[in-house]
Image (cartoon, rainbow, N blue to C red):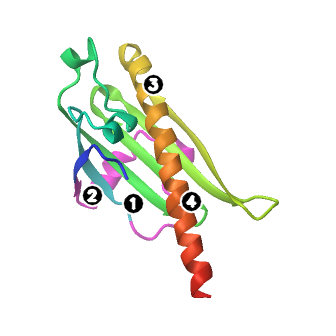
């Protein structure tokens, strides 16, 4: 769902242990989980100039072009949960993000997607990261809701 991702490579199961060493307790894998949460190396193309890529948060205007490479690699783990998903990302220069997406049913039967999360980074990068993450999360939330609505519609049609 992210137009700037150019590759996703699964890492060995042993990568899960190292990945979660510095993760706060609320973002650790669900208790009782019998298999490790898969960890992936992701490469994004930050040089893409398409409108979808810009909406996903790859804008590198002005001074940022000098410091942000054309490609960024990071490790991420996404845990499917009964009520949504939990995503963790560790990137270069000490950047980490934690996001919990929860799906609930509203009073009128409509589905509600709630997002809770946070980012840690060095001070120099925080403004850039906060801006690009906000923009990309808004787009991701829209895409997530569309995919969820399609899935629910297909379930209702099958019944």
The mark lying in front, picked from 1 and 2, is 1
Secondary structure at badge 1 equals loop
> Is 74 one of the magenta-colored residues?
no
Q: Residue at x 25, y 33 (%)?
A: 49
Q: Residue at x 59, y 82 (%)?
A: 157
Secondary structure at badge 4 equals strand
The mark lying in front, picked from 2 and 3, is 3
* Residue 85 visible to the viewer: no
Q: Nearer the viewer, residue 118 or 151?
A: 151
- Give the magenta-colored segment's residue range: 8-35
Rendered view: 78 above or below 134: below
Q: Which residue is mark 1?
A: 37
The mark lying in front, picked from 3 and 4, is 3
Instruction: Give whichever of discs 1 and 2 has the lower sequence position.
Output: 2
Q: Is residue 6 left or right of residue 56?
A: left
The mark lying in front, picked from 3 and 1, is 3
């Amino acid at each position: 769902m992210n137009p700037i991702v150019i590759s996703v490579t699964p890492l060995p199961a042993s990568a899960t242990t190292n990945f979660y060493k510095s993760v706060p307790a609320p973002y650790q894998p669900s208790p009782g989980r019998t298999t490790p949460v898969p960890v992936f190396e992701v490469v994004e193309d930050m040089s893409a100039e398409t409108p979808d890529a810009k909406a996903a948060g790859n804008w590198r205007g002005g001074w940022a072009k000098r410091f942000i490479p054309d490609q960024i690699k990071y490790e991420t783990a996404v845990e499917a949960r009964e009520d949504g998903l939990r995503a963790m990302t560790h990137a270069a220069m000490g950047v980490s993000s934690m996001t919990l997406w929860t799906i609930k049913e509203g009073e009128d039967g409509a589905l509600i997607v709630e997002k809770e999360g946070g980012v840690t980074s060095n001070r120099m990068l925080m403004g850039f990261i906060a801006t690009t993450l906000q923009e990309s999360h808004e787009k991701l939330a829209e895409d997530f809701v569309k995919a969820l609505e399609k899935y629910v519609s297909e379930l209702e049609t099958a019944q």
